[in-house]
Image: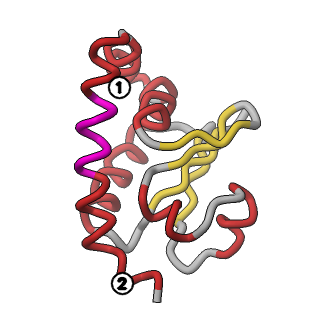
Amino acid sequence: MQTKVFFNNSCNICRAEINHYKKHADETIDWVDISNNQDAEAITSKSKSELLRRLHVIHEGEVVGGAKAFIIVWSKIPKYHFLSKIFKFKPLFVMFHYLYEIIAFFLYLKNKKQLK
């Protein structure tokens, strides 16, 4: 089953990270740029603001965002599978979740101009 990853290609940091993952991923991941993409909003049932705020994936029919989305992406890429195992461990996941939320918030502020 294919996993769809919704990311902001107009964010330099997001684009660099996703391009790195793309080099190591196979065709089971469909990479979807959310910038100016109303289809992404319809497919995920998320607003443009919500999509800009966090990475989202559709995995096994469920829309998942934030740190959990990263764990899913890592689990699909052999080179990063170990990260999915490490960060599933509850204490580490909680730390990762909050760190991700802080970083994602500042990236959102940086890219918020896209909402206009």
Residue 68 in the image: x percent, y percent? 47, 31
Residue 60 in the image: x percent, y percent? 72, 31
Q: Quadrant of the N terminus?
A: top right
Q: Say whether residue 101 is magenta.
A: yes
Cα–Cα gap, marks 1 and 2: 32 Å
What residue lies at 24% left-to-right and 48% top-to-bottom?
A: 102
Amino acid on which the number 2 mark rests in the picture: Lys
Q: Which mark is in front, 1 or 2?
A: 2
Specify the segment rendered in magenta. 96-103
What residue lies at 74% left-to-right and 65% top-to-bottom?
A: 42
Of 40 and 45, nearer the camera is: 45
Amino acid on which the number 1 mark rests in the picture: Tyr
Q: Main secondary structure of the magenta part?
A: helix
Rendered image: mark on residue 113? 2
Residue 103 in the image: x percent, y percent? 23, 50
Which residue in the structure is indicated by mark 1?
80
Q: Secondary structure at mark 1?
A: helix
Of 105 and 9, nearer the camera is: 105
In the image: residue 53, left or right of residue 105: right
In the image: residue 98, left or right of residue 53: left
Q: Quadrant of residue 92?
A: top left
Q: Quadrant of residue 46?
A: bottom right
Of 7 and 16, nearer the camera is: 7
| As drawn, 4 above or below 9 | above
CA neighbours of label 1 inside 10 A, class few (<14), some (14 to 19), many (20+): some
CA neighbours of label 2 inside 10 A, class few (<14), some (14 to 19), many (20+): few
Rendered image: mark on residue 32? none
Which circle's residue, 1 or 2, is located before the other in the chain?
1
Q: Say whether residue 52 is magenta.
A: no
What residue lies at 65% left-to-right and 65% top-to-bottom?
A: 40
